[in-house]
DNA sequence: CGTTTTTCATCAGATAATCTTATCACGGCA
DNA sequence: TGCCGTGATAAGATTATCTGATGAAAAACG
């Protein structure tokens, strides 16, 4: 074990992830033979086969299975070493990999990236937009530094700090303007349009209507983005909910009408989360303040417009 | 942080440990310029100076100080990776680094190494003989796989399993043969010869005589080994205690007399300890059984002789 | 106060590790 | 059977790393 190299670990990780020599090699930016050789050498060093090469597929042996999480841990530690170095300057700079859920990203990011970019030159921001479970997984794996999601996440390994709370508003066809706002339970009996499964906002909306999320869903019509939802409402297909932050952008070019609910107002809390062990904590707190400011700014602008 | 290498980590660790380029390089088995270059490259990669090169000494910067434990963790993880591989075979083989306290090593090791070596060829045993605190430190650092010390160690990160309990016997000049055995407290008033500070056996002996170990010690005469102690007794300088296991070897060529104490008999429990996280657990349990057998054998032989 | 010694940095050339391109061997599949 | 697509292997090119010689700067010595 004296001659293993990090390179071998990185290649191992890639191969374990892709289960395919050529693709893993490509991901590593090397040729397939180079990967083959390094893997072979690693196996020699370890003294056991790590991968089972069936003609059809490449997968971890049971021993490799035991090996992989340790390798990942090591690689993550090294990644965090870099974070530590970056953090040492106290200064906000270097790579920052941030994940954002799809029902927040399009509205928050333009403002946020603008303000972060101008106030902290030298901050290299990578954004990943996908649904919460995937974001949390990537966070755990060390492939993200932080994520903006709806709280709570209930992940004990993560710190979560709230950023802002946003209400949901009712969106109806323009012809419904002035009609009374239905009670939450009444929504169940109407044509409520929802995001497709996996979006936390879908669950939050259902929960507001007192629909058990786990129950076999009635055949709601489903869309893949808030923008589509509004277009469907506009076409008179039904009604939907929108998080406040999306209202300005999404309803601008549609002839739909927007109404607030009375109490209890439906809402969700958006927050920022990161690994408790992350050495970037100080930086991330700074970032979170920038996010909060951006959200504030956005709310003011929306209210004004 | 994408181009760091384990090699650089190992060199970093060595330099941090030795605080001296030439000696660290020597420890790594490379030339001093090679070390300089790799360290420089690591610093470049990290983006910060890790060492402060005073003309007089090389020491970690405050940032390097933060860096070092993480590096050590990583190196230890990799070491354990090797252990895991070895352990996977269930078979007892590969490198085994074992530490033993000085008042046990000379008596136990000949038998033990013999039995381990013959029964488990392919087991590459490295023995380290030094005092308990150092053994425990090296165990924590991952520089030892296991240690044989007096229990308890009170280290929560270690597993300890008892091997055997040995009594202490009184050793007096041959002319004292037949005299009554003094009570423990009486020993305080006699010329009791002890090992020098740091040996756990010294503390155990003092404790038996109800001397507070922390109290300013009376001017006991001190020796650096049990062998020396017996020679001093032989020369009529005083009396001493010996752990049973040492009696056979140490009193053979001396004209001293050995007497057992009445109840309560002084004694200590010798045990084996290792990191709870060690993947070698199964192997170490096997080893511990071998040790217990060796000790048994030794006791029988001593009783016979 | 000059000289010697010690220490780390730097450089050029030698050596070893790693990569690429070309090619093979094997099994699935039409 | 002949054609993919797969991973393994081989030879030569490239890159990383090491050594040995040397330099500069400070400390130790006489």
Image (cartoon, coloured by chain):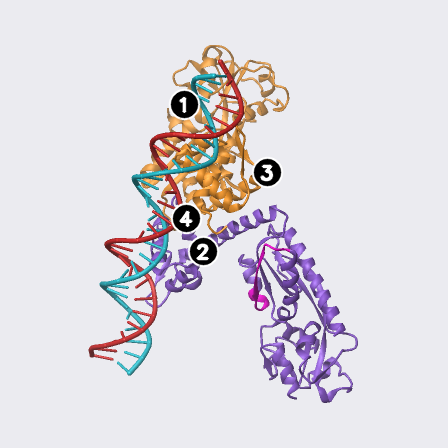
Chain colours: A orange, B purple, C red, D cyan
On the picture, is A266 further left or further right than A3? right
Callout in the foreground (3, 1)? 3
Residue A62: give its label: 3
Is label 3 in contact with label 1 (beta carbons under 8 Å)? Answer: no
Residue A248 disc label: 1
Q: Are marks 3 and 1 on the same chain?
A: yes
Chain assignment, label 1: A
| Vertical position of residue A107 compared to residue B82: above or below | above
Question: Which residue is the site of mark 2?
Answer: B68
Q: CA distance from mark 2 to mark 3?
A: 33 Å
Residue A246 placement: quadrant: top left
**Crowding at mark 3 (Cα within 10 Å: few <14, some 14-19, many 20+):** few
- When the figure is inspected, residue B202 is found, relative to residue A251, above or below; the finding is below
- Give the magenta-colored segment's residue range: B120-134
- Residue B235 is marked as none
Residue D5 lies, in percent from the top left, at: 45, 24
Judge depth for marks 3 and 4 and give the one in front.
3
Report the disc number at residue B5.
Answer: 4
**Between residues A293 and A98, which one lies in front from this camera angle?**
A98
Do discs 2 and 3 belong to a common subunit? Answer: no
* Label 1 neighbour load within 10 Å: few <14, some 14-19, many 20+: some
Quadrant assignment, res A301? top left
């Amino acid at each position: 074990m004296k001659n293993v190299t990090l390179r071998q670990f990185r290649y191992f990780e890639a191969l374990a992830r892709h289960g395919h020599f050529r693709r893993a090699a490509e991901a590593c930016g090397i040729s397939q033979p180079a990967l083959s050789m390094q893997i072979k050498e690693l196996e020699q060093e370890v003294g056991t086969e790590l991968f089972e090469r069936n003609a059809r597929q490449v997968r971890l042996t049971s021993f490799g299975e035991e090996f992989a999480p340790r390798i990942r841990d090591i690689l993550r530690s090294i990644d965090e070493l870099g974070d530590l170095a970056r953090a040492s300057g106290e200064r906000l700079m270097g790579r920052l990999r941030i994940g954002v859920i799809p029902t927040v990203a399009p509205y928050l990011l333009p403002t946020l990236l603008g303000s972060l970019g101008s106030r902290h030159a030298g901050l290299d921001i990578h954004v990943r937009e996908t649904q919460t479970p995937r974001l949390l997984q990537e966070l755990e794996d060390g492939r993200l530094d932080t994520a903006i999601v709806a709280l709570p996440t209930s992940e004990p390994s993560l710190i979560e700090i709230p950023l802002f709370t946003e209400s949901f508003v009712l969106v109806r066809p323009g012809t419904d303007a002035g009609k009374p706002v239905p009670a939450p339970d009444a929504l169940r009996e109407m044509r409520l349009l929802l995001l497709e499964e996996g979006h936390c906002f879908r669950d939050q909306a259902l929960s507001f209507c007192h629909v058990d999320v786990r129950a076999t869903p009635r055949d709601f019509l489903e869309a893949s983005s808030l923008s589509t939802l509004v277009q469907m409402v506009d076409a008179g297909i039904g009604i939907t909910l929108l998080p406040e932050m999306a209202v300005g952008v999404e309803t601008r070019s549609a002839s739909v009408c927007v109404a607030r609910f009375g109490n209890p107002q439906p809402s969700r809390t958006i927050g920022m989360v990161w690994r408790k062990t992350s050495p970037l904590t100080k930086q991330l707190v700074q970032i979170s303040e920038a996010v909060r400011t951006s959200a504030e700014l956005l709310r003011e602008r929306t209210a004004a417009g």
